[in-house]
Image: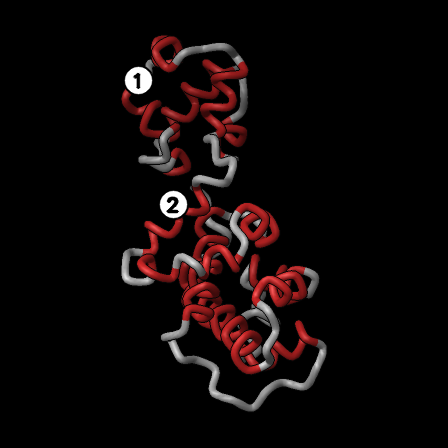
């Protein structure tokens, strides 16, 4: 799976979105879904989706919150690391990076007001468990599966045509192995069997 941006920027984006949501809800008294709607309509949203160095990485959470709410930045502590609101932002930013989906699609699939209801017990578990909440609502079919189905081939048939083991094809389609990290010869064999490009497989 191709992530939204380099993972070295992920902790910064997570902490800033988490702080923004926490401050908006707990200090500014903006309802969480209302704030997210305003966030989605702001330039800050796209900046976070791409780890924009000027806006997303170059400004504080308070400054970014001011942009979203169209008001002067707050002069308060940015991080508590403890509130459910902070956890929602932290998780949402991770999900956007991991799935490489727009925030709008993630929020439509699983609203923040619904996510915050799962603070207990999910905040005490590995974040991969929380990703399952999004995964269950998102259309995440692997491109390999989509292309194979379009050609009306079974996994076994594709394995025969490509020479790629059926267990490997299953692992790609189930997301257990990232097809983007497959060897070139494997990608070439699958692409040839499906009459598509290697780029088609990696979208």
Report the disc number at residue 149: none
Residue with the mark numbered 2: 132
Q: Quadrant of residue 55?
A: bottom right
Badge 1 vs badge 2, beta-carbon distance below 8 Å: no
Q: From this view, report whether residue 25 is shown above or below residue 150.
A: below
Q: Is residue 138 found left or right of 170 in the rendered image?
A: right
SS for tag 1? helix
Image x and y of residue 134, in percent: 45, 46
C-alpha distance separating marks 1 and 2: 25 Å
Which sits in the foreground, 16 or 112? Answer: 112
Instruction: Give the image location of residue 57, x and y in percent.
Output: 53, 72
Number of residues whose C-alpha sits closer than 10 Å to that of mark 1, classed few (under 14), some (14–19) or many (20 or more): some
Q: Is residue 41 above or below residue 161?
A: below
Pointer 1: what residue? 166
Q: Residue at x 39, y 28 (%)?
A: 173
Q: Secondary structure at mark 2?
A: helix
Q: From the viewer's perspective, tell me whether residue 197 is left or right of residue 167.
A: right
Residue 9 in sight from this viewpoint: no
Which image quadrant for residue 86? bottom left
Given residues 181 and 146, the one toward you in this image is 146
């Amino acid at each position: 799976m191709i992530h939204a941006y380099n993972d070295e920027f992920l902790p910064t984006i997570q902490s800033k979105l988490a702080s923004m949501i926490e401050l908006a809800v707990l200090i500014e008294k903006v309802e969480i879904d209302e704030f997210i709607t305003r966030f989605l309509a702001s330039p800050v949203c796209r900046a976070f989706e791409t780890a924009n160095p000027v806006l997303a990485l170059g400004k504080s959470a308070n400054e970014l919150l001011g942009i979203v709410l169209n008001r002067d930045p707050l002069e308060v502590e940015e991080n508590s690391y403890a509130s459910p609101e902070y956890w929602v932002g932290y998780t949402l930013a991770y999900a956007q990076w991991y799935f490489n989906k727009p925030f709008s699609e993630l929020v439509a699939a699983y609203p923040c007001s619904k996510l915050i209801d799962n603070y207990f017990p999910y905040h005490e578990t590995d974040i991969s468990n929380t990703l399952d909440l999004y995964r269950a609502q998102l259309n995440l079919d692997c491109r390999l599966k989509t292309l194979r189905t379009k050609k009306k081939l079974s996994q076994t048939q594709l394995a025969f045509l490509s020479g790629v083991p059926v267990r490997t094809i299953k692992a790609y389609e189930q997301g257990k192995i990232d097809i983007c990290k497959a060897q070139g010869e494997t990608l070439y064999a699958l692409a040839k069997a499906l009459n598509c490009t290697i780029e088609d497989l990696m979208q």
